[in-house]
Amino acid sequence: MDRADRRHTLYSQPIVTILYFSSHRSLPMQSSAVVVVPGWEEKLRNLALLLGRLGLAYLFFTQLFWKLPPTFGCTNDFAFPTPAAAPNYWEGNGSGGLCYWMGLETIYAPNFREVLVADMRPAGLPRIGVNITPIAQMNAALLDSVVKPGIAVFGWLIWLAEFWIFLSMLLGLFTRLGALVSIGVSLQLFIGLANIPRPYEWEWAYGSIVLLSLVLLGIAPGRWLGLDAALRRHFANRDGWLPRIIQALT
């Protein structure tokens, strides 16, 4: 073998080897296993979704009547509570209904307030919580400058928002939109009222509504025993912006 042949053999062997191994790599096996969900699990899941949906509907249903339009339960010509000299005290000023609770949100806004509190001191651990005072103060500023002066209009918006949540969850109609409105309403109440001292408002009375609404937003519960199921079937495989919006909200 002359020098040229030896050089050709020397340089071609690695290439042949690489091509051989690259063409004989083992391919990953594709699993054909199918996970079968037992029928009782699917029924249990659907029942839990239905109960959660109807539970949220009934919760907001019970809150419609103490702030009925057009006065929204407000008394004394839409009077609001006013701060008192003593800390954590206030004068009722003849207020009631929506005006009463809205007034408390602004009265307690300047005070230091924490939420998501876990007091672990009995176990020798620290007390932890999240300070929401700046957010509560921004909420109060919006109430004082915009909502309170326009209570005759904003009262309607608040009442209709809660009525829509009730109707949406009861009928299973646009449940993602209903859950989104519920998140907004309950989160505003959480910021304004959670853990105020007098009357004491337990933070999880509002926090649990926020969490339930988040879950319902994610799973769209109206797809089972709700009008959302019919809407999705009707607009399935249709083009255009309207079908896409309806699919997203149901």
Image (tube, rainbow, N blue to C red):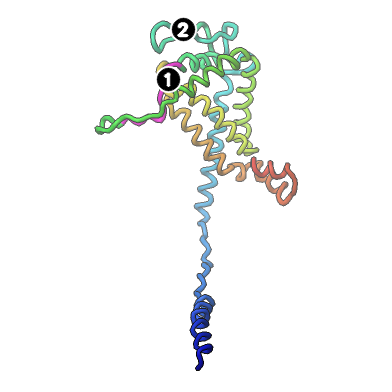
Q: Amino acid at mark 2?
A: Glu
Q: Looking at the picture, how far across and down is residue 82, in whole percent?
A: 49, 8
Q: Nearer the viewer, residue 26 or 250?
A: 26
Residue under numbered circle 1: 196
Secondary structure beneath dot 2 equals strand
Separation (CA) of disc 2 from disc 1: 16 Å
Q: Tell me the quarter of the picture where residue 184 sits.
A: top right
Magenta region: which residues? 110-119
Residue 19 percent location from the top left of the image: 53, 78
Residue positioned 50% across, 15% down in the render: 106
**Secondary structure mostly taken by the magenta-highlighted segment of the chain:** strand
On the image, the x and y values in percent for residue 199 come to: 42, 17
Decide which of 49, 3 is in the foreground and name it.
3
Q: Earlier along the polypeptide chain: callout 2 or callout 1?
A: 2
Residue occupying image coordinates x 56% and y 14%: 144
Q: Is residue 89 above or below residue 27?
A: above
* Tag shown at residue 70: none
